[in-house]
Image: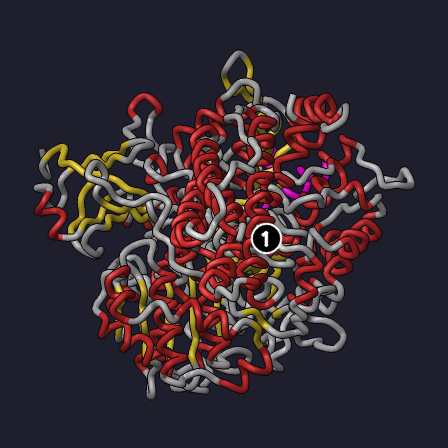
Amino acid sequence: MVDRIADPWGPRTPYGPGEPWPERVDLFLGGGLAEDDVDGWYQSASILHSNGDAMDIAVKDGRIAGVRGRAADRINRGRLDPKDLYGWQANNSPDRLTRPLVREGGRLVESDWDTAMGRITARSRELLDGPGGWGHFGFYTSGQLFLEEYYTLGVIGKAGIGTPHMDGNTRLCTATAAASMKASFGTDGQPGSYTDVDHCDAIALWGHNVAETQTVLWMRMLDRRRGPNPPAMLAVDPRLTPVAREADLHLAVRAGTNLALLNGLLREIVRRGWYDERYVAAHTIGFDELCRVTDGYPPARVAEICDVPAADVERAAELVGTSGRLLSTVLQGFYQSNQATAAACAVNNLHLLRGMIGRPGAGIYQMNGQPTAQNARECGADGDLPGLRNWDNERHIRQLAELWNVEPDTIPHWAPPTHAMQIFRYAEQGSIKLLWISATNPAVSLPELARIRRILAAPELFVVVQDLFLTETAELADVVLPAATWGEKRGTFTSVDRTVHLSEKAVEPPGEARPDLDIFLDYARRMDFRDRDGNPLITWRTPEDVFEAWKECSRGRPCDYTGITYDRLRGGSGIQWPCDERRPEGTERLYTDGVFSTDPDYCETYGHDLATGAEFTEREYRAREPGGRAFLHAAAYQPSAEVTSDEYPLLLTTGRTVYQFHTRTKTGRAPQLNDAAPDAWIELHADDAARYGIADGDLVGVASPRGAIEVTARIGRVRPGVVFVPFHYGYFDVDPAGRTPRAANELTVTAWDPVSKQPLFKTAAVRVARLSRNGD
Amino acid sequence: MHLAHYLGLLHRAQSTLAGAFREVAGAHAAEPDVFHLCHRQAQVCDTHAELLEPFARRYAEEAPDEPDRLHSELFGGTRTGGIGLLRDLQDLYLMAAECDICWTVVGQAARGARDRELQRVVGRCEGETAVQLTWLRTRIKQAAPQALVVAG
């Protein structure tokens, strides 16, 4: 087999437009095992990125021994990301948490489940007693648990405790995807299908380094690029990523200026007559206002704002404006940057103007960053309501109340669910007193880490952390609960393109570690949450019980799962929702008839002003008479909240490497992956490096108004004026005494998009200085 | 012709609101959304005042006497904490509401005066003031339960 560290994407299998993507089965087994040596194979999918690649887990002597891609699956046709090939080894890591820990005299000590859960329950009861008790609870979960776990957590929080303070780290990765789809199409739900790669004649990647974030999707694109009649490719990214190098046209825009570029492109498309007049008239609202706003962005002005050649703006407009089947993908370069929701909506506008939606090859992927982010959104464990319901729609709340048999008043719906940054603010101010963090590591992943550590360490805040390892966050907890993970528990999750997979339990969890679902169910039992008839609120015992209950919650909603069963997910390929009686095989593309989810009784939001996040009311929404038409949202470009200054002259952008995921909790414990990318670095343009006297390999100090880090310099791969630091690196593998700051989020700014509330990781002003020469 | 009175009133109300937005931003810098959006709205108010100025000058020439001080004192400085934020946002809301009704009055007068230019300015600015009101209401609704029912 090829070395998938040296070549993350593996050998090409070229194919032409409309042809099926050829199979290529990737396999890695540890300990020199051959396929025949394996005791059993258990079906699953990837948990180390958002693509949803299907695989089988190999088990030998009761331990996970490797993985093999599933050739039958529609998403990956057998291929695997290098993180999946090697990342499973973390399951067997000797430093897994195997017993609960509780804080005694300032130290975390080993304990037992009864003691740990007893402490959480006692504190919960104390806080819940009295008016406003719900407001002392915050739940901060993940994009890496299973559907069944999110739904259970959602019911506990919304119907058991009645708190709106629930969010996930999906806020950091995918909130803008959801917000933009709600804003443009009425509800969340990816219009496109991964098979659009098979049919398209142009691919536009908007702030999306797919080569490193979803390698298998990139393999599909590369295979089309190496086959007959390849699609044209446009990359918008301040860095010279592998995608930018492959693209026919690369716009290395100044960080924070995406919306100005998009406005310019939309203007060209209208003025050159490249839009579909009939589609726009029949299926959209807002064309005149869009034209009025975008008219102020001629190529010369865009060139000035974005610092790219005007001719390239015109070429980009032609590339996306004249294609016959355009595929767009969007990710963090847009979602974590200035005017995130407005810029992501502008990509939706492009497709609506051109009628490029709902047919093969004409698709949009508003991507996710994490494997189960879609489920956190659907199930109401993050800042959304279960079944993609509208918090401001009384009828939607009544549906949930009936389903759970609680009073509608129990379910908080006076405002949208509290977003993560606000949850941490309430904790900082002391009104949230219990913060339960599951499967995520905010002490490395949230902006402005010194502040986050201070909040988590405050003695008044009772912090519960549920994880596999003693993460940087767990170190600050009052109770640490050892969780089982992928391969040690059963459940389902859903990819970016709505494909649902079942992940089987292959082995027992280590020691006393428990599935996250069992932990939540245990809490619900101990808290004795009741419905309005005095019966237990939650009666589920197994993942399949929860899945069946969830199906009822999803009935009639965009994410309808009622036609899916665990058995139907076994063998063969995953199934795309919506899947119900009418569509038993699932649904490959949404909006094929140009009818969008904007009906006032069906939509997930009544809309926002994109510049401020001001919420519109039901009456205002109805007055627009959307009637199934999509919204063309227009917004003017505004400079970032934080811009460069003499003191901080460079813009920092953060992101990923192909070899690591999230905060390296798993990938940092897989030897091949860790050896490939063991430490943080900073990328600088050669001109900036020369200005500050920095050479490749020098140790560099990077400082912002919030903090400073020390990392090694890499020259190149980024545009002038912008520097890049990967966000994966924290401190768990460094002795607490010898921890030199290296986490990118020591530097980032506490600020967020007004609509999606996604933090702005991509625009912090910094300065750099050489600390020592390479080798000194 | 008394339009100058209202133009003067509105001009001062916009300038005062700009200042209040900046004060609230500074006092609640630990709420990053309030900090950034208040600063941005202050700029919007500045622009409104600038746009009004030529009209205020022009109509002042036709006014029988100097514009008087009609506006009320709504803002007496910022407060701290969760309830303080709520009260400060509410002050901003009331001040923006005063601007809002002034735009309506000035807009009507502009129609009566057949002043198309002023009508265009009013059309743009009253929409932006309406957004300010909607945003402030949104933020107040979000903050109220935690500040009034939960926080100790």
Say if B113 sits above or below A663 in the image.
Answer: below
Q: Locate residue A300: give its quadrant.
A: bottom left
Say if A565 sits above or below A145 in the image.
Answer: below
Locate residue B48, reporting x and y percent: 44, 50
In the image, farthest residue toward the front: B64
* The stretch drawn in magenta includes residue A412: no
Locate residue A502, reporting x and y percent: 62, 60
A367 or A295, nearer to the observer:
A295
Report the residue marked by disc 1: B105
Locate residue A525, reporting x and y percent: 77, 35
Residue located 53% across and 26% down the image? B76
The answer to whether one can see residue A486 in this image is no
Residue type, mark 1 in image: Val
Say whether residue A745 is left or right of residue B141: left
* The stretch drawn in magenta includes residue A506: yes
In the image, farthest residue toward the top: A105
Locate residue B17, reporting x and y percent: 48, 39
Residue located 78% across and 59% down the image? A552
Name the chain letter of the residue that bears numbered label 1.
B
A290 or A319, nearer to the observer:
A290
Say if A291 sits above or below A276 in the image.
Answer: above
Residue located 43% across and 75% down the image? A327
Q: Locate residue A132: give its quadrant.
A: top right
Q: Main secondary structure of the magenta part?
A: loop
Say if A273 sits above or below B10 in the image.
Answer: below
The answer to whether one can see residue A678 in this image is yes
Is label 1 in a helix, a strand or a loop?
Answer: helix
Q: Give the magenta part as a residue range.
A: A505-522
Say whether residue A442 is left or right of residue A708: right
In the image, farthest residue toward the right: A533
Quadrant of the image for the C terminus of chain B? top right
